[in-house]
């Protein structure tokens, strides 16, 4: 059997964290088994579906690297096929028309509430003669659910789950306006797309019992179901915006890397021993449904951020420059070819301290900032009269001694100058750092000097000695 999975979002908003994880699990399962990962846009709710939301879904999946193996299917485009299947069920006696008015349905609900019974359709038109239909009323089409026995779902995550069939009402398949309902459309699309495994959130588990009956009524084989637990906040409550439940695009803007997001989402409800850092290659090799837990996962922004820091350190320096330059320019710091060269030379040190791309851009500003540099409070304190005097001596020695412009040679030279001046190395190194970066903290001083180059180092030292920085 060829494994075929699908991600089927409704385009009524952004691609949220829960949806991204569902897409990831489907993508990984298909990749692990050498199958296909498909995308279906469930856009039958025309009032709420938007092109902007569809674009956001495509963009989010593309950023995460979860590209479907075939062009996406738009559910609305298949509405005639859905209705055709309902008509077949009607012709075969597995469905029926219902002419109940909204008032009758509401009265039915009120009676059920008053009698403390489950609120369900009571089957008024199930066996009634259509000749009794009221004139001028468009009927809905309902499925004939079995009234005895049980429906069993052997879920790949939740285990064996059973519902008594008398708890399932005759749900609507086609509305009075002729539009198919979600429950019908999903089943027809899953069958026609050849979906072998339906992997989705466990909030859809109740739907599975009803959809199983639609599969049965159409004489189609049931796919395997796997309902994964939802994601909660760190406090155990349902995930909301206050926990960080933003759209995937927001995390991209905040400076998270897609590989970090994939790794983090993977660990929300799935595990492989004690492994926390799992590359995408290992995830494809290891992922299977038996690694999914049944308890709700808890979203923790701090853990995601720490994981992102790890992946930042692994990223190629040139790639990070390409990611950081737009952020620097958005901060008001144009980056020319010289600035890009400095960033490449200094990226190895910059990325060691960063946790997100925003941090990285902020830390990199001094490489591309125009002179004279603005000083932070600590740098300004270091560049007092004594600090500037030591800088003047160091600047003269740097020109006169002309050490090689390598990290090792520059460090040895600075230590020798400090010794000649009769001060501790830090008393000289800290003012140099402040003059070259405008900050009291930076990557390694001599790495910074090499990245800036001799001419820029001398110019920044001149600014500091003259009090321009």
Image (spheres, helix red, strand yellow):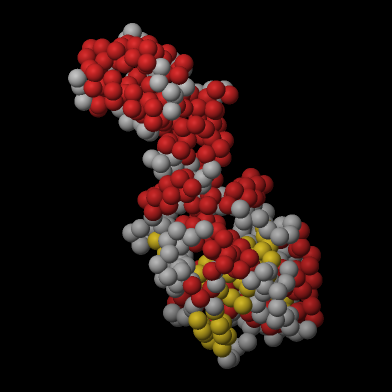
Residue 147 x %, y %: 60, 88
Q: Give the residue drawn at x 52%, y 58%.
A: 279
Residue 82 x %, y %: 75, 68
Quadrant position of residue 443: top left
Specify whether residue 463 is in view.
no
Q: Residue furthest bottom?
A: 149
Quadrant position of residue 128: bottom right
Q: Give the residue drawn at x 46%, y 32%.
A: 346
Residue 112 x %, y %: 49, 78
Quadrant position of residue 136: bottom right
* Placement of the N terminus among the 4 image quadrants: bottom right
Residue 416 as seen in the image, left or right of residue 330: left
**Foreground of the two, 330 or 135:** 330
Residue 248 as seen in the image, left or right of residue 435: right
- On screen, residue 351 above or below 381: below
* Placement of the C terminus among the 4 image quadrants: top left
Residue 361 as seen in the image, left or right of residue 102: left
- On screen, residue 106 above or below 344: below
**Foreground of the two, 84 or 469:** 469
**Foreground of the two, 212 or 374:** 374
Total numbered badges shown on the rendered structure: 0
Residue 165 x %, y %: 57, 86
Q: Give the residue drawn at x 42%, y 13%.
A: 459
Q: Give the residue drawn at x 33%, y 27%.
A: 412
Specify whether residue 405 is in view.
yes
């Amino acid at each position: 059997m060829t494994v075929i999975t699908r991600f089927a979002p409704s385009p009524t908003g952004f691609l949220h964290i829960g949806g991204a994880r569902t897409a990831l699990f489907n993508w990984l399962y298909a990749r692990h088994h050498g199958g296909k990962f498909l995308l279906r846009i469930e856009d039958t709710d025309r009032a709420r579906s938007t092109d902007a939301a569809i674009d956001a879904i495509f963009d989010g999946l593309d950023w995460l690297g979860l590209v479907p193996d075939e062009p996406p299917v738009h559910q609305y485009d298949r509405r005639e096929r859905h209705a055709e299947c309902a008509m077949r069920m009607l012709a075969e006696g597995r469905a029926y028309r219902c002419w109940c008015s909204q008032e009758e349905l509401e009265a039915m609900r009120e009676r059920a509430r008053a009698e403390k019974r489950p609120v369900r359709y009571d089957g008024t038109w199930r066996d009634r003669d259509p000749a009794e239909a009221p004139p001028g009323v468009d009927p809905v089409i309902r499925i004939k659910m079995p009234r005895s026995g049980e429906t069993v779902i052997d879920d790949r995550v939740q285990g064996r789950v059973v519902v008594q069939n008398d708890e399932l009402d005759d749900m609507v398949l086609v509305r009075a306006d002729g539009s198919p309902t979600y429950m019908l459309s999903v089943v027809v699309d899953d069958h026609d797309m050849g979906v072998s495994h339906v992997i989705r959130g466990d909030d859809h588990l109740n739907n599975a019992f009803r959809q199983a009956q639609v599969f049965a009524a159409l004489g189609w084989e049931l796919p395997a179901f796997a309902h994964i637990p939802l994601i909660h906040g760190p406090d155990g409550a349902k995930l909301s915006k206050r926990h960080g439940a933003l759209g995937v695009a927001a995390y991209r803007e905040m400076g998270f890397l897609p590989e970090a997001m994939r790794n983090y989402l993977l660990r929300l409800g799935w595990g492989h021993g004690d492994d926390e850092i799992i590359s995408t290659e290992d995830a494809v090799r290891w992922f299977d449904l038996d690694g999914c837990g049944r308890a709700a996962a808890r979203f923790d922004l701090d853990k995601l951020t720490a994981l992102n820091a790890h992946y930042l350190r692994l990223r190629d320096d040139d790639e990070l420059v390409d990611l950081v330059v737009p952020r620097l320019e958005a901060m008001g710091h144009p980056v020319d070819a010289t600035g890009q060269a400095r960033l490449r030379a200094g990226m190895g040190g910059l990325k060691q301290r960063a946790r997100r791309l925003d941090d990285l851009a902020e830390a990199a500003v001094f490489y591309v900032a125009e002179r004279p540099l603005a000083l932070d409070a600590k740098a300004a304190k270091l560049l007092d009269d004594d600090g500037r005097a030591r800088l003047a001596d160091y600047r003269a020695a740097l020109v006169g001694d002309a050490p090689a412009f390598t990290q090792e040679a520059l460090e040895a030279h600075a230590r020798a100058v400090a010794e000649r001046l009769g001060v501790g190395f830090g008393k000289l190194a800290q003012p140099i750092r402040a003059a070259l970066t405008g900050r009291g903290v930076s990557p390694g001083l001599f790495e910074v000097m090499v990245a800036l180059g001799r001419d820029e180092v001398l110019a920044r030292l001149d600014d500091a000695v003259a009090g321009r920085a």
